[in-house]
Image (cartoon, helix red, strand yellow):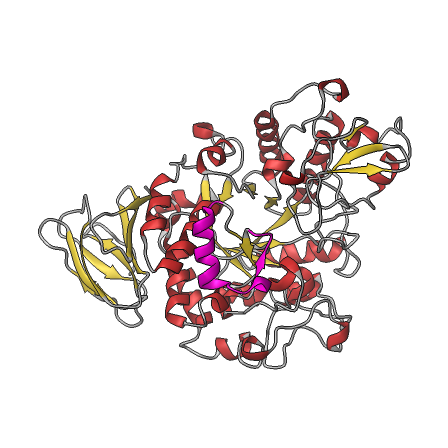
Amino acid sequence: MNLTDTADLWWKHAVLYCADVQTFVDSDGDGCGDLTGMAERVDYLADLGITCLWLMPFYPTADRDDGYDITDFYGVDPRAGTPGHMVELVHLARSRGIRVIVDFVMNHTSDQHPWFKESRKSTDNPYRDWYVWRSSTPPDTSDQVVFPDQEDSIWELDERTGEYYLHNFYKTQPDLNIANPAVRDEIARTMGYWLQMGVSGFRVDAVPFLFAEDTLPESERKFPAYDPHEYLRSLRRFVSRRGGNVMLLGEVNLPYPEQKLFFGGTDADQLTTQFDFVGMQATYLSLARHDARPLAKALRSRPRLSDESQWASFMRNHDELTLDKLTDDERQEVFDAFGPEPQMQLFDRGLRRRLPTMLGGDMRRIRMAYSLMFSLPGTPVLFYGEEIGMGENLDIPGRLAVRSPMQWDPSGGFSQAPERQQVRPMTSGPWGPERINVADQRGDVDSLWRFVSRLIQRYRQSPEIGWSQVEVLRGTPRSVLAHVCRKDEWRMVALHNFSGEPVEISVTVPDLPDECSFVDLLTPGSPRRIEPGPTGVLETTIDGYGFLWLRVCSAQDTRVA
């Protein structure tokens, strides 16, 4: 494969950074982060090395679900700025080599959206069919609710018209009726608008809900059935016409076989990228057990994808750390290891903690976990603050515990407003800004920030990671995951030890070229070389919670190690 070929599909080899505008930087002292503040940190992000900024919702909102209850899909929340500020941010980021993607949340609206206000005025209102209504009493759907602490049904009675509307999430977030062609046209129109504003793609929220056909009694269906996957294909064609190489990053928390359908199979004509929820959850089970086998098993079951499709690897996202794909006993193991107190858990399926606190601040394990994330075939995604090891604030309710303000310097640095006026309280104590902040870590050559920056650099210099299928090697100790990233003539071997004890490794790496050596990519200083045995055997020792990235270098490899 030619190195220049890797530029064709930028999302195959990108490094994503998810940031919440309202908790990143407050430039005007009103206590809420804004787009101007985000623009002021573009050079910081470029210095870190990320290549794509994912913005959480910044749209006008009723503020019942941290911006995911939107009242205008074409606008910018006044607290964040104006559409002009958004264009300036996108333009500035692009000048620094950073693309911008935005959250696309059109499974539902806020109940304060003008469409829904019109919809509930009468049963014959023109906007009535933009939402999913039923006149018959719905069955018990308590087992289908996403937020069991707040809802006991996915249907809500509207007193004015005496009918029920569908809401897969909160009752203040009525579902749009995707079966209605007018709604589908509006979704495309919204995407077209933001592409015209310069964004490079979308993180598509709640994909299984957005594209699912709603279950209404046959007698109450007003539109013919539609094929969700054909609709997704039509959107992919639309954004490709409007924007060329547009990323569609899907939130699809389903088992692997069902996830694969949303890529579009060998045609790769639906989502370009999907989060690997199954692999992420297996990673935490392996961390809890100090045993790499659960993750190895998950990775071996990961479907092979076409070259146009991609997995997104992550250790943490902006929601609860969901563990719903684990068995009850496995989930309890992870709870016991990383969130034993009830206040650390959420919805009986997840944790509201960040990685450093779950690992007790053990920098060996923290670095190993991020090394693993960047080494897995796919596109790595960082959640803001991960690069410095921020912790959560459990005093903030629900999923928002991990969305505390960014910690820029020992005094906080997020806002000049008094703390009581800030959008959310800063984390305090041992995980507060006095001890964990950007300013201190950027000046420390041994900091986590420096380590993450080096991982990004090495990932960007190793396109075989983003362009390969996962290949787990056998014959390692139970605590060690060994995998190969292989794309044509490029190869890299990654070793990660989930145990605190050092282990000796002797593993066969198949199909090595003649007269090659393994070059250590992560250890500072002059690159260390390890010569393979005569039958392709790699022998080395890995420290407790240690890791190695070893590039297979032959005489034909012209890349700089």
Horizontal relation, residue 293 to residue 94: left or right: left
Horizontal relation, residue 144 to residue 351: left or right: right
Q: Quadrant of residue 344?
A: bottom right
Which residue is drawn at the image coordinates 26% and 44% (left, top)?
489
Q: Position of residue 252 (x, y in %)?
A: 54, 41
| Res. 362 in view | yes
Tell me: residue 181, above or below residue 144. above
| Res. 460 in view | no
Q: Quadrant of residue 424?
A: bottom right
Tell me: residue 556, above or below residue 447. above
Q: Position of residue 289 (x, y in %)?
A: 36, 58
Horizontal relation, residue 102 to residue 307: left or right: right
Tell me: residue 268, above or below residue 41. above
Closer to the camera, 306 or 514? 306
Q: Is residue 137 magenta?
A: no
Q: How many marks?
A: 0
Q: Position of residue 88 (x, y in %)?
A: 69, 57
Q: Quadrant of residue 74?
A: top right
Q: Position of residue 286 (x, y in %)?
A: 37, 55
In the rendered image, which quarter contains the N terminus? top left
Closer to the camera, 286 or 50? 286
Q: Is residue 329 magenta?
A: yes
Which residue is drawn at the image coordinates 38% and 48% (left, top)?
377
The residue positioned farthest toward the left in the image shown: 534
Tell me: residue 515, above or below residue 451. above
In the rendered image, which quarter contains the C terminus? bottom left
Magenta segment boundaries in residue numbering:
325-348
Horizontal relation, residue 287 to residue 89: left or right: left
